[in-house]
Amino acid sequence: MNSYYQFKFWLTAKKQPFPGVCPEPQGNAFKGLALFLLVVWTIGANALVFVVLKKNPRLQTVPNLLVGNLAFSDLCLGLIVLPLSSVYAIAGEWVFPEMLCEIFVSADILCSTASIWNLGIVGLDRYWAITSPVAYMSKRNKKTAGIMILSVWVFSSLISLAPMLGWKQVAPHGNMVQQNGTWQCTFLDLPSYTVYSATGSFFIPLLLMFFVYFKIYQAFAKHRARQIYRQKVIRKHIESTILHEISHVLPTSDEFAKEEEEDEDDSSSSGAVENGLGNNDAIPEEDEMEAESSGRDERSDETQHTTAGSSVTPTLPGKKEVTMARSLPPISDRKKKLEAKPVKSVVMISYEKVKRHKIRKERMYRKSLQRKPKAISAAKERRGVKVLGIILGCFTICWTPFFIMYIVVQFCRENCHVNPHIEMFITWLGYSNSAMNPIIYTVFNRDYQIALKRLFVGDKTKPAIRAL
C-alpha cells in the first residue's frame, strides 16, 4: 500500500503545479539552452534538405520529394510550434493571447500528424517499389508524388481542424484552461476527439509502417535467398566447365593403350639386347635416353649415331666394345617417343593453366555483376531498407510515450495528473523526432552527403558528383 501511494504521489504531483516545474534560475537557464539548441537544429537541418533538393535537380526523384515533404513538415513544426512551446515550457504558463493558443494547438497537431504520415508514405513508396517494381515504376513519377504529398496534408488538416467543425462546441471548455491561478494551453478536453486524433495521427500510421517494413524485410529476405541460390548455380556451372575443358586436355584411354604398347615393344627390344650381351654389358635404354635428353654435345662425344640399320659402337670404361646392329629404332622415332614421354607433367601443367584461367574468368564475371545496374540498385534498396528500419525505430521510441500519456490522462481525469517534469520530457521527446529525421537521411544517403559538401565547399566536389 505504501508503494502504491508513493507511485500515486509521483504520478499526480498535485502539490507542485505546472508553473513551478523548474523554479531555480539555473534550471531554467539549462532548460532554455537545451530547448534553444534543439529548435535551432530542427530548423537548420530540415532547411538544408530543402536547399540541397533545390540546387541539385538530379536529386529530385520521387523518394527524395517525399523526403522533402517530410522535411517541410518538420520545418513548419520547428518554425511555428517549437518556439512557442519553448517559451511555454520555461514560463510554466501560457503568456500569449487566447487566439494564438488555438493556432498553436492546431499547428501542433497538423505538423506532427503530417510528419508522422510522411514517414508512413516514404515507407509505402519503398514497399511498392520493391514488391511491385514493374507495375509501380510505370506510375512512379512527380505527379504520383504530388498526389501522395497532397493526401498527407489533407488528412492531417481533417484531424487538426476537426474541433472547429463541431467538437469544440461540445467540449466543456476551449483550449485555454485555468489551473492554480495560471492559464494553460491544452488540447481539447473531449474523449471522443482524443481517440479520433490519436488514432488518425499515430496508431494508424504506426500499424501501416510496421506492416510495410515487415513486408519489405520479407521481400528482401526472399531476394537474398534467390541471389544465394543463383550464385551456387553459377559456381556449379563454372566447375563443370572446368572439368569439360580439362577433359579435352587429358589423353584418352586409346592414347594410353597405344603408349603402353610402345613401352612394351621398347622393353622387349631392350630385353633381347640384354640376352645377347649379358647383364654386365647391357646399356639401359632409359639411361641412354636420359643422356640424349640432357645434352647433344656430350652425346656426340661418347656415342656415334648412324642412320637406321647401321651399327652403334659405344665404348665403356673397363668394358669390352659392343656392336649392336639393327637393334634400336631410328633416331626420329625415338625423338618422338622422348617428346611423348612426359605426358603426366604436360597434363598437370595444362590442368593448372585451365584452372587458373577459369578462376580468373569467374572473378571477372563476379566483378562485372557488381558493376551492373541491377546490383547497384539492389545495394541502394538494401540501404533504403536499413534507413527505413532506423526511422521506424526512432519514430516508435519518440512518439509512443506521448500518445499513451495523451490517452491515459484523458480517461483518468483527476486521478492521473502527470508529473510536470515527465510531461515536458515526453512532449519534447516526440518533438525531437523531427530533429532526428534529417540526421538519418544525411548519414545513410551518399547523394545528400556529396550535395552537402558541394553546397559548403563549392566547385571542388563537382568532379566527384559527375563521376557517380
Image (cartoon, rainbow, N blue to C red):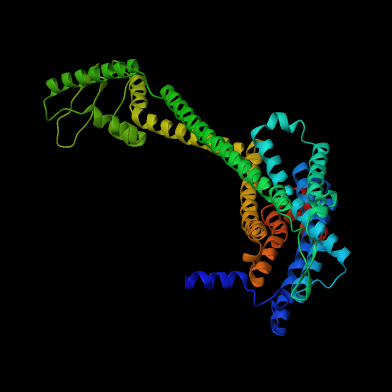
Determine which quarter of the picture holds residue 451. bottom right
Q: Is residue 54 visible?
A: yes
Question: At 14% from the left edge and 28% from the top edge, which residue is drawn?
Answer: 281
Counting from the top left corner in percent of width and height, residue 335 is at 36, 24
Name the residue at 77% across, 46% down: 66
Q: In the displayed structure, does residue 241 sit left or right of residue 294?
A: right
Comparing 116 with 243, the one in front is: 116
Q: Position of residue 438 (x, y in %)?
A: 72, 57
- Rendered image quadrant of residue 254: top left
Q: Nearer the viewer, residue 88 or 4?
A: 4
- Which residue is the extreme one toward the bottom? 25
Residue under the point 52% across and 31% down:
230
The number of callouts visible is 0
* Place of residue 80 in the rendered image (x, y in percent of width and height, measured from the top left): 83, 62
Q: What residue is rendered at 45% in x and 34% in y?
A: 355
Q: Nearer the viewer, residue 156 or 339?
A: 156
Residue 340: x, y in percent?
A: 36, 24
Residue nearer the viewer, 1 or 435: 1
Q: Is residue 100 left or right of residue 380?
A: right
Q: Is residue 367 visible?
A: no
Q: Answer with the quarter of the image where residue 341 lies.
A: top left
Look at the picture and state if 108 lies above or below 199. below
Q: Is 85 positioned to the left or the right of 317 in the image?
A: right
- Left or right of 406 in this view: 341: left
